[in-house]
Image (spheres, helix red, strand yellow):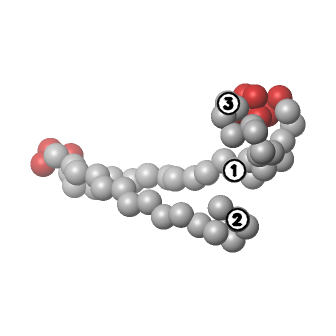
Amino acid sequence: MGVGDYETMAITVKLGKKSGRTAEAILGVDSYDVPTGAETLSRDGLERMGLKHW
């Protein structure tokens, strides 16, 4: 993906009758500027490398 590209995702939540029928969620993303070849590093590995992230 390039700069300005985006992806969408559909999330379906089914609540039981006893739940009160409401749900709340906060969603976010932690995006790193990853160099080629570092795609499989863990978050800790990326932070140790000092990579820029948002």
Residue under numbered circle 2:
2
Residue lying at the far front of the rendered structure: 37
In this rendering, position of residue 25 left or right of residue 38: left
| Alpha carbon separation for disc pair 3 and 2 | 22 Å
Q: Is residue 27 above or below residue 47?
A: below
Amino acid of disc 1? Ser
Give the mark nearest the N terminus, 2 or 1: 2
Residue 27 percent coordinates (x, y): 52, 53
Q: Is residue 30 above or below residue 48?
A: below
Amino acid of disc 2? Gly
Residue under numbered circle 1:
31
Asked which quadrant contains residue 6, the reply is bottom right
In this rendering, position of residue 53 left or right of residue 24: right
| Alpha carbon separation for disc pair 2 and 1 | 13 Å
Q: Residues within 10 Å of mark 1 (few under 14, many from 20)?
A: few
Q: Quadrant of the N terminus?
A: bottom right
| Alpha carbon separation for disc pair 1 and 3 | 13 Å
Q: 32 and 14: which one is in front?
A: 32
Residue under numbered circle 3:
42
At 61% across and 51% down in the image, what residue appears? 29
